[in-house]
Structure formats: C-alpha cells, structure tokens
Amino acid sequence: MKKTDSLKSNLDFQKVYKTGKSYANKFLIMYVVENGEERNRLGISVSKKVGNSVVRHRVKRLIRESYRLQEAVFNSGLDIVIVARSSSAGISYKETESALLHLGKLHSIVCPIN
C-alpha cells in the first residue's frame, strides 16, 4: 500500500484551489487535481468557523483517519484538499467516512475493492 504524503505549503494549497475541480456535500468540500506522481498528497483545512482548537483538531483527526483507512479505494497520483464546513463540528466517524467516500465517488476517484 502506498503511503499518503501531506500538502504543507500554502503554494501547494493555492495550486489545488485554482486548478482543481471541487465538489461539496453537507460536511466537506473536496478539491482534486492530478500531481503527476505515484502517491497521493492530502491537505486538510479546518477554519475557525468550525469551532475552537479542540473541535477543529478533532475534525481534522477524523478526516485524516477516515482517509487513511479508505486509502486503498482512492486512485493514486492526486493532490486532494479537504475543507471542513462548519456543520462538521459535531459529526461522528461514520458520518465523516461516508461524506469522504461520497465526495470521492462524485470526483470518480474511488475504485471499488473486491
């Protein structure tokens, strides 16, 4: 299994925002652009509108963990930025995972695993 790197620089985030395609649902917004590499790079953005630092960090951990466990079903070679909406403040792990997979299906970057 390929390990996912993370997007860290503001320049990388801006590139994905400007050139990537985005879809949204009730809890998350996902931007995707191809990066020309073999690995995926994941960036997570949680605004102060979501809540205080404890709430924001919890949402970030939920998103990262749900992606990590479902990483095998995502196509490789992508830069993915996930933005948490303010409604994601009190959601459970299952809701986070469901929202993430829903957006993956909208982007057509999720391949079913048998």
Image (cartoon, rainbow, N blue to C red):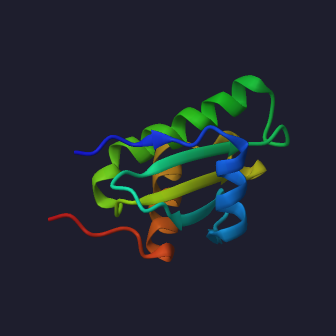
User: Where does the image place residue 37, in percent across and percent down from the top left?
Assistant: 39, 56
Residue at image position (25%, 69%) is: 112
**Apparent side of residue 104 relative to residue 71 in the rendered image (left or right):** right
Q: Is residue 46 left or right of residue 66?
A: right
Question: In front here: 43 or 88?
Answer: 43
Query: Residue 9 location in percent, x, y?
Result: 66, 40
Residue 27, given in percent of the width and then of the height, sits at 65, 56
Quadrant of the image occupied by residue 101? bottom left
Answer above or below: position of 109 versus 67.
below
Question: For this view, does 72 lie left or right of residue 20?
Answer: left
Q: Is residue 90 left or right of residue 95?
A: right
**In the current view of this chain or complex, which residue is farthest to the left?**
114
Q: Tell me which residue sits at (36%, 67%) in the image.
A: 110
Percent x, y of residue 57: 65, 29
| The C terminus, quarter of image | bottom left
- Say if 67 sits above or below 112 in the image: above
Viewer-closest of 47 and 99: 47
Q: Residue at x 22, y 45 (%)?
A: 1
11 is higher (above) or lower (below) than 58: below
Give the residue displayed 57% in from the left and 43% down from the top.
Answer: 7
- Give the image quarter of residue 60: top right
**Front residue (pair 7, 70):** 7
Is residue 84 visible in the rendered image? The answer is no
Furthest residue toward top:
54
